Image (cartoon, rainbow, N blue to C red):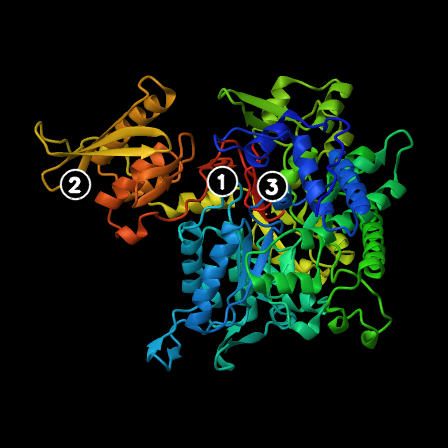
Amino acid sequence: MVTTPPVITHPVDLTDNARTVLERRYLLRGDDGAVVETPEEMLARVAESIASVEGTAELRADWAQRFYDEMAALRFLPNSPTLMNAGTDRGTLAACFVLPIDDSLDSIMSTAQAAAMVQKWGGGTGFDFSSLRAEGEPIATTHGAACGPVSVLRHYDDVSRLVTQGGKRDGAKLGSLRIDHPDVRHFIHAKDDGVSAQRFNLSLAVTDAFIEAAASGGSIDLVDPHAEAARGSADAETLLDEIAQSAWETGDPGMVFLDTVNRANPTPALGAIEATNPCGEVPLLPWEACTLGSVHVARFWDGDVGALDWAALDETVTLAVRFLDNVIDAGGYPLPEITQAVRGNRKIGLGVMGFHDLLIAAGIPYDSDEALDFAEELMSRIARTADAASAALGEEKGVFPNWERSIYHEDSGPAVRYRNATRTCIAPTGTIAIIAGASSGIEPLYSLAHTRRMQDGTLLDEVSEAFGEAARAGGFHSPELISELAAGAGLAGQAAVPERVRQLFATAHEIGWERHVAMQAVFQRHTDLAVSKTVNLPHSATPEDVRAVFLRAHELGCKGVTVYRDGSRAQQVLAAGERAPSAASTRDSRRRLPDERPAVTHKFRVGEQEGYLTVGLYDDGSPGEVFVKISKEGSTVSGLTDAIAILTSIALQYGVPLDKLAEKLEHTRFEPAGPTSNEDIPFATSIVDYIFQWLRLHFGDQAPDRLHGPDRAPIVTASGLVCPDCGAQLGYAERCLLCRSCGYTKCG
């Protein structure tokens, strides 16, 4: 339907960083790759599209303008796929999906195909593998043995690598398994090698019975889902310790509390909930998707009167509920089963961002009882308002089609005619928080400053606006302090910073885990779906601390929990390698090439860049040197490839395995990138990526069908993880890695 475009009345007040993120990841581009819309035009495009499902031209024009004004004021933003794809002919407006898996080869393969289609459309996927029989169990029809859930998980990870999403969003994945599955221990350690299933978050679907057994020293039966018979037992306390140890080391697995989730299932007649989306905040039935958005709550703080403008917040929440409900009809879905499930229950999830910003504006430390009380008041108000808005929509437009099979039907108690089976959810805000200039979700600030890489390659330390103002007002602002904060330091020990300021600006790793869990529980009490939050622990935390987090989260009614210990993933990667040989042992081990040696020269093209790769060979045919010549002599890329070639040649001659070099350098991302002239390597993320894919294909140990290699984790430094796009440090929050410099994330 034709909708009158909204009037762009004023520019959107964006930070430089927000504009950079929008240009890199959100704004539409022409055939030549150039940006062809402004941020204001993007929001107008989205508003017009989402209002197009209203019933009359007058309503469409009115709501398009109101939607635009709300987004342009940065009071509300929908999730990234809606901003990227609304009003275009590509992708989906929903962020994540849950796909079913049954215990048959047909189901396993058809779900893999469905997952590929979802990822192609720009969505992430959650899977529960609990229906699959354990590894080694007999298969009567083939007289063989089952491969087990972990093998299927790894297969889906391989499928994910084959699918591109146009460079906008990577397809996040979550795999879950019931705690009483016979392969539970194998699943816990599915990612331990640092190579397998790295695109997946892992969650254990934990039951009340397991928690009770762990607390009482009991055991649980391990039940084969195919035979529905016990295949042994496990000491619950020992198993919990093993889970805690793994999460302490790697951040995986998290936990989803299955019984807590299903006690809040609004449509139990349609089936039990078994899986969540990749970030854990949306428990869904098979084929359902999440339609998410967030209110920037700090925008409603009135500094003149020192109070929250509750009436204005109510107006925004009411508008946001209508917006998200419209998204369900405005967007398309990759598969008919998804369309039917999504529109049958019309689940939406409205949440918040900028919560720590709001606490700072109100002068309330995150690590305080006052913050918990404020969170209770805030989220209970948002929930009541969202419920009322959905009920009003139910009267105006009709209830969701499965309403009569829901807990809201009069047969289950007093009838409530909601338009949406769920209304609220605390989702990862990731890049939309950067756009809005907000702290992420309900998380405390991950850091007070970060280092941003400018377009010319220079580095700039950027500080939190609120802290920068406080530091200047207090007379303790200095370049040295900002540099220390950007390097990962907190305010503890900064004698020049007043104690009250240190309390107010305490970052995620400075706040005790008890407060993290308590805050999550407060928001969960007033949230229909679940809460995406990470319990950040300092590097000094113990596995016993992780165990305590799991138990406390269950006790307080959280639907799931994720733990990340500072530096744990870095430690995992470093520990996975062998001890480096001493200098003395390698000094004289260089294997030089003969003066006359055979060579292979390969012509290639990456994007619009042509080049030649020459590999010098030993007598046995193994590579010993690499030369790269590209057409733009004297360019930065030419100099970089020369340096890489020299270092590769030296490494090969000192015995570094080619596969190890390829493992570290494949998937390096920088321009030029794009389609290649080689049908065996159809796409490369850089010339270096192409070179090492080609070298691995022709000289590596792996077979050609493993050409693309394992999905590499981001680069690791001593202080943590580094963004694979821009090189800035990543933060871990809301169960997602996020770069606040360029907006790289797999979730937001």
Residue that numbered label 3 is attached to: 84
Instruction: Count neighbours of disc 1 (C-alpha within 10 A) and say few if under 14, some if 14 to 19, many if 20 or more.
Output: few
Instruction: Count neighbours of disc 3 (C-alpha within 10 A) and say few if under 14, some if 14 to 19, many if 20 or more.
Output: many
* Kind of residue indicated by mark 1: Gly
Residue that numbered label 2 is attached to: 622
User: Looking at the image, is 279 positioned above or below residue 616?
Assistant: below
* Kind of residue indicated by mark 2: Ser
Which badge, 2 or 1, is on the more N-terminal residue?
Answer: 1
Find the distance from the CA under tag 2 to the CA under tag 1.
Answer: 35 Å
**Can you tell which mark lies on residue 167?**
1
Camera sees residue 201: no
Residue 630 versus residue 239: which sits nearer the camera? 630
| Percent position of residue 53, x then y | 73, 51
Find the distance from the CA under tag 1 to the CA under tag 3.
Answer: 12 Å
| Left-right relation of 643 to 230 | left
Q: Secondary structure at mark 3?
A: helix
Task: Please report the residue visible at 62 percent of the width from the left and 58 percent of the height from the top.
Answer: 289
Residue 395 versus residue 699: which sits nearer the camera? 395
* Kind of residue indicated by mark 3: Met
| Left-right relation of 66 to 542 | right
Judged by depth in the image, the label closer to the viewer, 3 or 2, is 3
User: Looking at the image, is 525 positioned above or below residue 358?
Assistant: below
